[in-house]
Image (cartoon, rainbow, N blue to C red):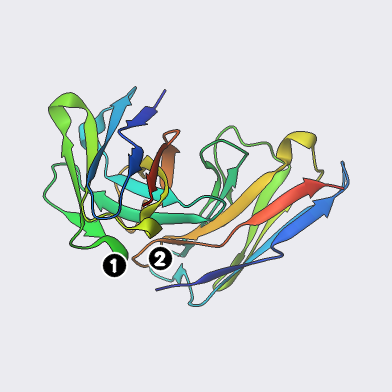
Amino acid sequence: DIVLTQSPDSLAVSLGERATVNCRSSQNVFYSATNKNYLAWYQQKAGQSPKLLVYWASTRESGVPDRFSGSGSGTDFTLTISSLQAEDVAVYYCLQHFAFPITFGQGTRLEIK
Amino acid sequence: EMQLAESGGGLVQPGESLRLSCAASGFVFSTYWMSWLRQAPGKGLEWVANMNQDGTKTNYVDSVKGRFTISRDNSKNSLYLQMNSLKVEDTAVYYCATQTPGYNILTGYWFSSWGQGTLVAVTS
């Protein structure tokens, strides 16, 4: 199975500052035939189900604020929140859908400093 | 708007069975691959099983193979998860979710819409 390791496990950032979450895959999730990285990012707020933020590693889902951005390729990926808002407090998960079983990272808890 | 509503969770003892249901609305249910995922209390997310549009193809995570069965009834816009021989480690919130339209190497396989989940607690 592909293992996704996120860092850090938790993160405290001041309002308006940048937050960065990393995700490292145990295998390459880039498929050259499609030129795509099979990596997505989700946000899960307390008591809620996960919400899709980014797919294909860097494509923002419709309706997601543009302060959220994804980057990276191959085995190393990053989710960046450019200016943290109070409503961004959540746990963030990366997901790979390159190979079955589909797997998630362990999550990164983001709090306000 | 896509909506998914899980039901059927509850408190059971190890070895017992439970059947979860997921009612879909707001989209053409019969055109989507559907999945069950779970989240143990305070833990991360785990994909459990999925099924294709007409119910002829299924996939399971190794830890539930032989114990859980996914099924669907497109006439009722419903997805099901029959869980037998439940173990303490199956305790989790179970979510149903749609997978990407198309569900192929070009469209990807992520989970686009999720329900709110139903809690299954297995304890003696």
Marking on residue B62: 1
Q: CA distance from mark 1 to mark 2?
A: 18 Å
Q: Position of residue A49 (x, y in %)?
A: 51, 38
From the viewer's perspective, tell me whether residue A102 is left or right of residue B59: right
The image shows residue B49, relative to residue A28, as above or below, that is above
The image shows residue B89, relative to residue A113, as above or below, that is below
From the viewer's perspective, tell me whether residue B1 is left or right of residue A13: left
From the viewer's perspective, tell me whether residue A1 is left or right of residue A14: left
Q: Position of residue B116 (x, y in %)?
A: 45, 33
The image shows residue B12, relative to residue B116, as above or below, that is below
Instruction: Mark 1 vs mark 2: give the one in front.
Output: 1
Foreground residue among B104 and B78: B78
Residue depicted at x 62% and y 36%: A64
User: Which secondary structure lies at badge 2?
Assistant: loop
Q: Position of residue B35 (x, y in %)?
A: 31, 46
The amino acid type, in three-letter code, at marker 1 is Asp
Residue depicted at x 37% and y 30%: B4
Question: In the rendered structure, the residue with mark 2 lies on which chain?
Answer: A
Mark 2 nearby-residue class (10 Å; few <14, some 14–19, many ≥20): many
Circle count: 2
Residue depicted at x 69% and y 62%: A9
Residue depicted at x 52% and y 56%: B44
Residue at mark 2: A98
Please report contact status of discs 1 and 2: CB closer than 8 Å, yes or no.
no
Question: In the rendered structure, the residue with mark 1 lies on which chain?
Answer: B
Looking at the rendering, which quadrant does residue A107 occupy? bottom right
Image quarter of the N terminus of chain A = bottom left
The amino acid type, in three-letter code, at marker 2 is Phe
